[in-house]
Structures are given as structure tokens and as C-alpha cells.
Amino acid sequence: MTSPDRPLVAPDFAVPHPPATDRFRLEPLGPQHNAADHAAWTSSIAYIRANPDFTGRSWPPPGGMPLEANLDDLRRHAQDFDRRVGFTYTVLSVPGDDVIGCVYIYGSRQDPGVTGVRSWVRADHASLDAELYRVVSDWLAREWPFERVAYAPRVSPNGGELGRMSRKLNEPELNEPETETAAQGS
């Protein structure tokens, strides 16, 4: 069972090594990513707000936020990771290690049995959105103990919908309206 204040996984669960491809890799998000993370999402606010995971939500704020406020959010995400109540990963380009996106894994506020997943990529890396979705969905299904996951489907490069390939992922009734704080979005 998940909730925003309860750990998503058991204390003895070994958090899986994050996935990597020949185009990007995931790494736990932390304060060391502040400047690059801030530059990434502030360069793509309109694009991220149009993403299925963020449409109609308060994050990212249309006017951005100061770098210090972003640092506070990154510290909060790192604390959530340590407490196992949320797992946030930065998406880094391969090669180069530029911050090109982010993945958030948190308990649902509406349904304690659901794990909510959101992700974004910078507008100049839009071609990676469907691939990131596929890689993260497969990783969650294969290596995490979540029974039900809400993660908005993506459109593949050939126009078909992605999202029904992993066990119990993307049940339509699980794509919930916004209720989390801005801290779950930056």
C-alpha cells in the first residue's frame, strides 16, 4: 500500500539500479543537479505543461522559480528518496550527462494502493519522451514491487499509444487529477 507519507517499498527492498540506454540514463536526483535541473525545466516550461503527466497541474510554474527554491525542491526529493516515500530520478543524456528530464515515483493521494509516475524531457529532446516512458514502464514492471501504477500513456514515434505493455500499468481510472504539492513536480 502506498501513501504520500508511507514508504513505497519495504525497508529491506533493494532499490533497483536505474535504467540506462545508449541515449539516456537515470540517476537519483539530488542537490548536485540544481543548476542543470533548473536550466532544463525552465527552458521547456510550455512543453512540460503540455505533457500528459503535467497538463492542468501547478508544476512547472508558468513563470519559473528562483534557483534557490529549486534547490529546496531537490533537497526534498532527496529526503523522500532516503525515507522511501518517493523516488525521483534525473534523466541524463548519453553521452554528455546533460540534464534532459526527470522521473517521479510517488504514492497516490487519491488511492493508497496506487503508485503515481510522472516524467518529462526537455523540449529539445522531445523525441526521447516515448522511449523514456517505455524504459521506465518496463523497469517498474520488472524490478519494482508496485501492484498498480498510474503513468499517463505516450504516443510512440509511429503514432500508436504506448503504455499497456507492462503489468497493471496505466489503468485508465488511475490517471488522477492533481493534488500533490509543487515539490512532486520539480
Image (cartoon, rainbow, N blue to C red):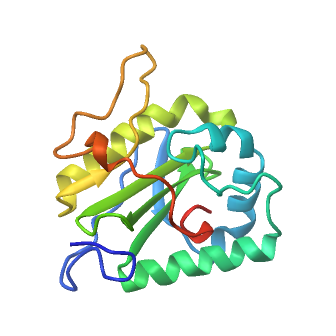
Compared across the picture, whether 7 is left or right of 20 comes to left
- What residue is at 51 percent from the left and 67 percent from the top? 180
- Residue at image coords 70%, 52%: 41
| Image height of 74 relative to 131, above or below | below
Q: Where is residue 103 in the image (x, y as percent from the top left)?
A: 48, 55
| Residue 155, x across and y down, in percent | 43, 25
Q: Can the viewer see residue 122 in this picture? A: no
- Residue 179 in sight here: yes
Q: Eyeballing the image, is 109 above or below 177?
A: below
- Residue 70 percent location from the top left of the image: 71, 71
- Spot the residue most to the top: 158
Question: How many marks can you see?
Answer: 0
Q: Please tell me which residue is depicted at 62% across the width and 67% down the height of the picture.
A: 182
Quadrant housing residue 170: top left
Quadrant of the rendered structure where residue 147 is? bottom left
Q: In which quarter of the image is the N terminus?
A: bottom left
Q: Is residue 142 left or right of residue 62?
A: left
Looking at the image, which residue is at 80% across and 70% down? Answer: 67
Q: Is 126 left or right of 103, judged from the image as shown?
A: right
Q: Nearer the viewer, residue 120 or 124?
A: 120
Q: 97 or 87: which is nearer to us? A: 87
Q: In which quarter of the image is the C terminus?
A: bottom right
Query: Is 1 rendered above or below residue 119?
Result: below
User: Looking at the image, is 83 positioned above or below residue 48?
Assistant: below
Question: Is 181 placed left or right of 26 in the picture?
Answer: right
